[in-house]
Image: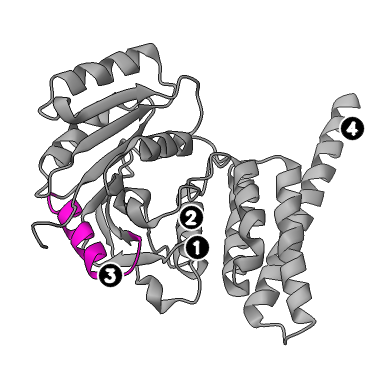
Amino acid sequence: MKECEDLSVSVVVPFFNRSRFLKRLLDSVAAQTLAADRVYIIDNGSSLEESLNAWKIIRSHTLYDKCVFTSSIGRGNANYARNLGYKLAETRYVAFLDSDDWWQADHLSKAIKLLNKSDKVATYSGARVHTANGVILNNSKDIKLFDDPFSLIMSPRNYLAQTSSYVIDKSKVSLNVLWDESLKRHQDYDYFAVIYYNTCGWCYNPNITSNIDWNEGGHKSALDFNSLIKFYEKWEDSIPYTIKKSYLASMLYQSYFYNANDNIKIYYKEKITQEIFFKSSLYRVKTSDLCLALKIKAIKILDELQIKNTIKDILNKRL
């Protein structure tokens, strides 16, 4: 990199009740070989105790002079916090880092070096995924290998393009290219697609420099199916048929696993049925499609049996 190049970079951290991970995060930012100019920690409606704990950690850290700790006032979602930090940043580059994740020391330098060599506006990578059973290396794939973003981010092969790997060249992005604040789930999928379709696109970073905590950290709350459906309907016309099939089947399974309400289950059943039988009128039905159709039929039968058993239980109690 040339000395005259603008390498200024801000880090944006959406924060909600995760003070126990904050020192680890700040330590990793402080260790960067390319120093961050600012660290925006956006408190997104945390409890008073968590906010005070976070402030104590920030005040005692070596990055204190570079930190901006502010609040979104009301409880929004992580995308509101990300947008606020992104808008506040006055640097050329903006790097996103979730509050329970952390980076390798060369994360910023390698990401920005790649961006400077490309004509792209943003970079992403795979990650070291830390689980209760050990560390999994997910290398992801180069977006250039695919005809659309969804074949990467929604692949049944579980390729990662995770939020904490994102570094954006703000000087090349329109001000209206932001995170969708109405979404509580699939936020990273949506932003990846927004950048893909509304800018010069993504640059793949083959270096794994992000660490994701799926053991102590991670998102453990119940799935927001309404948000998942909103994301799907937003991009439905752009998602390839093969990806739709596997994705909808997965969502149908999860709707039963998490005991979603009947409207959610019906929605995914109908969507799968539409996809299979609309396509089968145009193409020969594949074996995988028939298997999926049989699975849906089995689920419907199980539903009917459950209703019959419930009625039988009621009648037995009355007798």
Q: Badge 2: few (under 14), some or many (20 or more) residues near its Cα, within 10 Å?
A: some
Labels 2 & 1 near each other (Cβ < 8 A): yes
Q: Amino acid type of disc 4?
A: Leu
Say which residue label 2 marks. 189
Which mark is first along the chain, 1 or 4? 1
Q: Residue at left 16%, top 57%?
A: 5
Provide residue 30's location: percent of width, then percent of height.
12, 38
Name the residue beneath numbered marker 1: 154
Gap in Å between the C-alphas at discs 2 and 4? Answer: 48 Å
Q: Which residues are magenta?
A: 105-122
Of circles 3 and 2, the one toward us is 3
Give the CA separation, mark 3 to mark 2: 22 Å
Report the magenta stretch's main SS.
helix
Q: Quadrant of the C terminus?
A: top right
Which residue carries the number 3 mark?
A: 118
Cα separation between marks 4 and 1: 46 Å
The mark closer to the camera, 4 or 3, is 3
Question: Which residue matches tag 4?
Answer: 315
Q: Earlier in the sequence, mark 4 or mark 3?
A: 3
Secondary structure beneath dot 2 equals: helix
Residue 220 appears in the rendering = no
Is 266 colored magenta in this rendering? Answer: no
Viewer-side residue, 45 vs 128: 45
Q: Quadrant of residue 2?
A: bottom left
Residue 266 visible (yes or no): yes
